Image: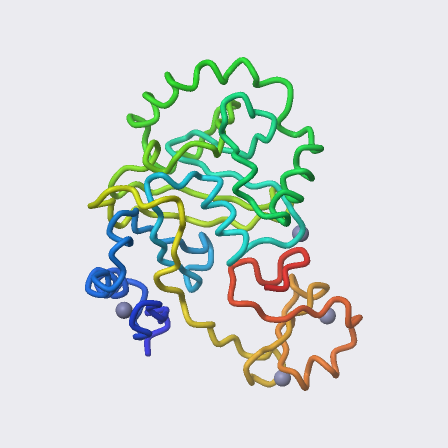
Amino acid sequence: MKAAAFPGTCQLCNGSFDKKGMAKRIAACGEKLKDAEAGFLLLIEGLYQPKYWLYLNAPAEATLVDLDVFLRKIWVECCGHLSKFTIGGTSYVLEPRDSEEGDLDEDEFDEDEEDLFDEEEEDDEFGGDNEDEFDERDDLQDDLFDAKFMEDEEDDSNESMGITLGEVLQPKMKFSYEYDFGTPTKLSLKVVDVPKGKAAGREITLLARNNPPEIPCSRCGKPATKICLSCIYGNEAWFCTQCAEAHTCSEKALFPVANSPRVGMCGYVG
Ligand SMILES: [Zn+2]
Ligand SMILES: [Zn+2]
Ligand SMILES: [Zn+2]
Ligand SMILES: [Zn+2]
């Protein structure tokens, strides 16, 4: 199999297909999942690690917060870092204090997630200086649709992730996500298909996912099971179980090889 094929598994039929073929496959399997037709079909990939990919069904009524929570759970969460989406040059961040707008309905989150937001509420990074800009939200939203996709330049204004996907996403649109601004994991997202039916709640569904890539042990070539965070920027960081035992770094530096673009970053364990 070609390395570029990046095989994965369809969650609907359990069939194995490469990343590109999967979109067609999902359309064919979609009959089995009626609600799926009501949502955006999103392809999400590691920006610098395209071997990690997901296809999601996300209803138009789901918010960027819902998508953030989903991505944290399946791929990136390690210790409650900040995150943001960038769509058409505008950044969307979590703004727990923006409660007047009703953007964050905290009742919808379980306790773990509430802890997460509590932590970020204490973080002052996005507080203070941008409150006036909330009034301009509607204008900005109008501008958004004219903005070019994937613009690198971002202005200082941060919009709220409380906005729904239906309000910001357009057919074929590409956008990006970043988790942890210190040791970031960057994802690229693409709208492969748009909702055909009515909104179906806010639940985001995993439709397909890459199979765990085979990463060889840096020393012997057997499949790696551990990654050494102390050696991650050197030549030898991936180890099979045997070579991990023989590795001289502290055991605390050895982390499991997770099927995620965040593997080897911060304290990510999968
Ligand atoms: Zn299928
Ligand atoms: Zn972390
Ligand atoms: Zn080995
Ligand atoms: Zn090491």
- In the image, is residue 75 above or below residue 2? above
Rendering quadrant holding ligand 1 = bottom left
Which residue is at a point 40% across and 65% down the rendered structure image? 209
- In the image, is residue 68 above or below residue 244? above
Which residue is at a point 38% across and 56% down the rendered structure image? 205
Q: Which colour scheme is used?
A: rainbow
Q: Position of residue 177 (x, y in %)?
A: 47, 44
Instruction: Name the quarter where the C terminus is drawn.
Output: bottom right
Q: Position of residue 158 (x, y in %)?
A: 51, 26
Instruction: Name the quarter where the N terminus is drawn.
Output: bottom left
What count of labels does the image hold?
Answer: 0
Horizontal arrangement in the rendering, residue 16 relative to residue 52 (left or right): left
- In the image, is residue 103 above or below residue 258? above
Q: What is the residue that sits farthest to the front in this orientation?
A: 107
Q: Where is residue 64 in the image (x, y as percent from the top left)?
A: 45, 39
Q: Where is residue 262 in the image (x, y as percent from the top left)?
A: 56, 58
Observer-nearest of 101 and 161 = 101
Observer-nearest of 16 and 238 = 16
Horizontal arrangement in the rendering, residue 63 relative to residue 21 (left or right): right
Observer-nearest of 119 and 270 = 119
Which residue is at a point 47% across and 39% down the rendered structure image? 85
Kindly indicate the quadrant of the structure image that contains residue 36: bottom left
Kindly indicate the quadrant of the structure image that contains residue 142: top left
Which residue is at a point 63% across and 64% down the rendered structure image? 269
Horizontal arrangement in the rendering, residue 86 relative to residue 33 (left or right): right
